Amino acid sequence: MGAADQRFFDALRTAHYPPGRNRVASHITLFHHLPPSALDELARLIRAIVADTPPPVARVSDIYLLDRGVAFRVESPDLLAIRARIADRFAGLLAAQDRGTPRLHITVQNKADPAAARKLLAELRRDFRARPLAIAGLAAHHYRGGPWETAFERNFRGMRGRY
């Protein structure tokens, strides 16, 4: 995300995610698992995508209840198109969880008491207004059983209306 959006959602996540479980910054998951053997090819593909692609247009459109938490819904046909480009390249390697089209979202609470999640949803909905969301780049991470380790991060460099 853009810096201001990252700070906003990280602050919510810090305030409402169970502390022992908050091991990663706020993010929008495009894939849950790609095999480590695909990392070099993924890095090359992401470099190509960010070089010729402008930052995707996105908006935060709603807040909704997870089973035991709260998430902000993200709408972005542009980001879904980028995801489709990546999925096409790695189609034979995708885990079952990654074969469908994702519901883009930013989780600010998870693995909490269901009553606490309902309360947070009501609080956040009081002042909620749909708004644009800045998408700055793409990243890949290694899961190491605790905190996530960044494999790489790349910012979009393509320009809108260039063609």
Image: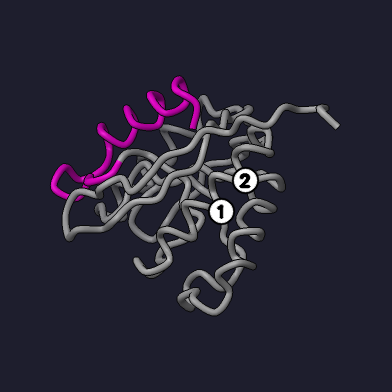
Say if mark 2 contacts mark 1, CB within 8 Å. Answer: yes
Q: Amino acid at mark 1?
A: Leu
Q: Quadrant of residue 87?
A: bottom right
The answer to whether 55 appears left or right of 146 in the picture is right
Q: Which residue is mark 2?
A: 49
Q: Which residue is mark 1?
A: 45
* Residue 11 located within the stretch drawn in magenta: yes
Please name the residue shown 49% across and 57% down the image: 42
Look at label 2 and name its amino acid. Ile
Highlighted magenta segment, given as a residue range: 1-24
Looking at the picture, tell me which residue is in the foreground, 162 or 146.
Answer: 162
Q: Residue at x 71, y 48 (%)?
A: 77
User: Mark 2: which secondary structure?
Assistant: helix
Q: Position of residue 12 (x, y in %)?
A: 34, 31
Crowd class of label 1 (few under 14; some 14 to 19; many from 20; radius 10 Å) = some
Magenta region, main secondary structure? helix
Q: Position of residue 148 (x, y in %)?
A: 25, 49
Say whether residue 82 is left or right of residue 13.
Answer: right
List x then y, in percent, for residue 62: 58, 41
Residue occupying the point 50% across, 26% down: 2
* Residue 147 coordinates in the image, percent (x, y): 19, 49
